């Protein structure tokens, strides 16, 4: 177990006045499931976007494996972690479901056979085979959510950040996702899951962080231990 992220005195403001997030110090492990819970508008997505490098702190530093995200490109960060947006439409842009899935693999230069195998595996795992040739824009919300998740997982990131992954999933799909996450945890993939769904997210959680009004109001991990973790 290693520290993947370290937040050092991080403040974020969208408008230059009101703080959407203020974190004095926070270390996130590269293993286990860190659950982030909190009310609407509490700052959960802001935290996720800061970790994914989509937002850069107004003040302070977000360190990914000791490196300041301000000095990293989104591509460099994306090579180390996978990120699922709260709105799945944000990461869907290809003309067909299968092209959506294969896009990142083509960029990374995998062979055609390998790409086909990986795409088929994801289509099966997320029950999307029958939609392979469909235009992603017209998928149902739950299907889009599953496609976005499959797209995040297809190139096997070592750590994933999922923002509200159960939104729009029915009970059956939610249970399946829970099983998939358990499998990933068993494969030693670390994750941070942001969710309103307390029961879902705490089922496999190794740590629960609660955010309230932009600050961490509860952390199941002892803050003294946190402070002593190596960066
Ligand atoms: N692009 C933006 N511009 C201005 N303010 C924003 C923007 N995005 C978020 N905010 C504000 O920042 C605060 C935190 O928002 P954030 O999206 O992080 O909350 P959240 O905990 O993810 O909420 P939810 O549970 O509804 O997803 C809120 O007050 C929100 O209105
Ligand atoms: Mg949010």
Image (cartoon, rainbow, N blue to C red):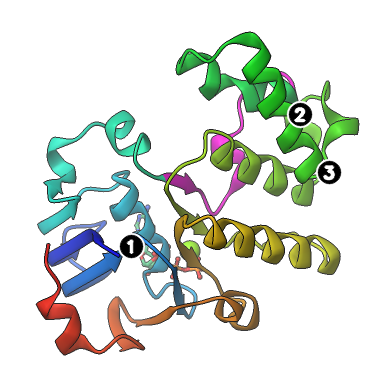
Q: Position of residue 221 (x, y in %)?
A: 31, 85
Q: CA distance from mark 2 to mark 1?
A: 33 Å
**Considering only order in the chain, which callout, 1 or 2, is on the residue closer to the N terminus?**
1
Q: For numbered disc 1, what is the local secondary structure? A: helix
Q: Which residue is mark 3?
A: 127
Identify which residue is drawn at 54% across, 21% down. Answer: 105
Residue depth check, mark 2 versus mark 3: number of the one nearer the observer:
2
Q: Which residues are magenta?
A: 82-96
Residue depth check, mark 2 versus mark 1: number of the one nearer the observer:
2
The answer to whether the beta carbon of the residue marked 1 is less than 8 Å from any atom of ligand 1 is yes
Q: Could you say which disc has been placed on residue 120 in the image? A: 2
Q: Position of residue 125 (x, y in %)?
A: 76, 44
* Mark 3 crowdedness (10 Å alpha carbons): few <14, some 14-19, many ≥20: some
Does 171 sit left or right of 59 as displayed? right
Q: For numbered disc 3, what is the local secondary structure? A: loop
Judge whether residue 110 is colored magenta.
Answer: no
Judge whether residue 85 is colored magenta.
Answer: yes
Identify which residue is drawn at 46% across, 42% down. Answer: 157
Does 89 sit left or right of 138 as displayed? left
Q: Could you say which disc has been placed on residue 47 in the image? A: 1
Q: Could you say which disc has been placed on residue 140 in the image? A: none
Position above or below: 86 against 221? above
Position above or below: 215 against 76? below
Q: CA distance from mark 2 to mark 3?
A: 10 Å
Question: What quarter of the picture does the C terminus occupy?
Answer: bottom left
Does 84 sit left or right of 141 as displayed? left
Tell me where residue 92 sits by quadrant: top right
**Considering only order in the chain, which callout, 3 or 2, is on the residue closer to the N terminus?**
2
Tell me where residue 81 sits by quadrant: top left
Q: CA distance from mark 1 to mark 3?
A: 31 Å
């Amino acid at each position: 177990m290693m520290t993947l992220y370290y937040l050092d005195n991080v403040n974020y403001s969208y408008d230059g006045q009101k703080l959407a997030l203020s974190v004095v110090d926070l270390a996130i492990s590269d293993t286990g499931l860190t659950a982030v819970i909190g009310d609407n508008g509490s700052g959960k997505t802001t935290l996720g976007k800061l970790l994914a490098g989509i937002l850069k702190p107004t003040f302070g530093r977000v360190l990914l494996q000791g490196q300041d995200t301000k000095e990293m490109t989104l591509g460099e960060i994306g090579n180390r972690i996978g990120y699922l947006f709260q709105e799945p439409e944000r990461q869907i842009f290809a003309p067909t479901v299968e092209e959506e899935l294969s896009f990142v693999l083509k960029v990374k230069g995998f062979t055609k056979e390998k790409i086909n195998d990986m795409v088929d595996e994801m289509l099966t795992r997320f029950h999307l085979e029958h939609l392979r040739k469909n235009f992603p824009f017209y998928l149902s919300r739950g299907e889009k959510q599953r496609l976005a998740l499959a797209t995040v997982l297809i190139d096997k990131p070592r750590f994933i950040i999922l923002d509200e992954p159960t939104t729009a999933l029915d009970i059956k799909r939610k249970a399946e996702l829970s099983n998939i996450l358990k499998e990933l945890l068993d494969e030693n993939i670390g994750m941070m899951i942001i969710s309103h769904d307390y029961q879902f997210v705490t089922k496999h959680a190794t740590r629960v962080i609660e955010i309230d009004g932009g600050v961490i109001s509860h952390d199941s991990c002892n803050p003294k231990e946190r402070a002593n973790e190596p960066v």
